Amino acid sequence: MYRNGDRIDAEKLIQAVREIAAEWPDVVYPANLDSSGPACYYTTEDGCPDCIIGHAMARIGQALPAQQRSGMNECRLLNYSVRETVWSGVLNTTRENLLWLATVQNYQDSGYTWATAVSRADNELEGRE
C-alpha cells in the first residue's frame, strides 16, 4: 500500500503498465464525463485497482487507498497541472517517463483500449530525449 513519503520507481511502474496492457489489451476504462472531463479513479471505493495506473501501482506493491466518489475528476496523480507538486520527490523518474505515464493515462481516460493507450504513448514520444 502506498503511504505518504514512499518513493515509487517509475521504471517498475512503466513495466507494470506495459504488462497489464499486454495481458488485458482490449480493456476500455469506463470513464464517466463530468464538467472537467473524464472522471477516472485509480481505485474503486472499496480499494480495488480501477484504471491502468491503479492496477500498475498495485502490481508493484504500491496500491493506492480507496477513493471516494465525489463527482470530481479524481485521477490527479499524473495530470500535468499537479505533476510537479504531487510527484516531485515521490516518483523516481525523468520528465520523459512522467510524460509517457501521463499520455497513457490520457488516452485511457479518453476511451482507448489499454493496448492502444500504450502504443499511442510510445508513438507520440518516440525519439524524445
Image (cartoon, rainbow, N blue to C red):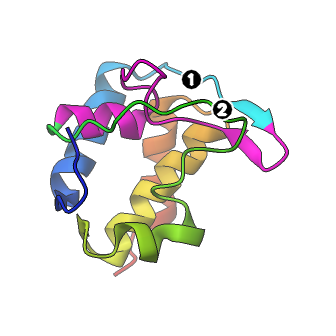
Q: CA distance from mark 1 to mark 2?
A: 6 Å
Q: Which residue is mark 2?
A: 111
The total of numbered circles placed on residues is 2
Residue 81's image quarter? bottom right
Residue 63's image quarter? top left
For the residue pair 9 and 120, the one nearer the viewer reads as 9
Q: Earlier in the sequence, mark 1 or mark 2?
A: 1
- CB atoms at circles 1 and 2 under 8 Å apart? yes
Residue 53's image quarter? top left
Percent x, y of residue 91 = 26, 65
Percent x, y of residue 99 = 44, 66
In the displayed structure, 95 sits above or below 66; it is: below
In the displayed structure, 34 sits above or below 91; it is: above
Label 1 residue SS:
loop
Residue type at the position of mark 1: Val
Magenta stretch contains residue 92: no
**Magenta segment range?**
34-59
Magenta stretch contains residue 56: yes
* 97 sits left or right of 61 in the view: right
Q: Residue drawn 56% across and 26% down?
A: 29
For the residue pair 16 and 84, the one nearer the viewer reads as 84
Q: Which residue is mark 1?
A: 28
Percent x, y of residue 94 = 28, 75
In the displayed structure, 5 sits above or below 14; it is: below
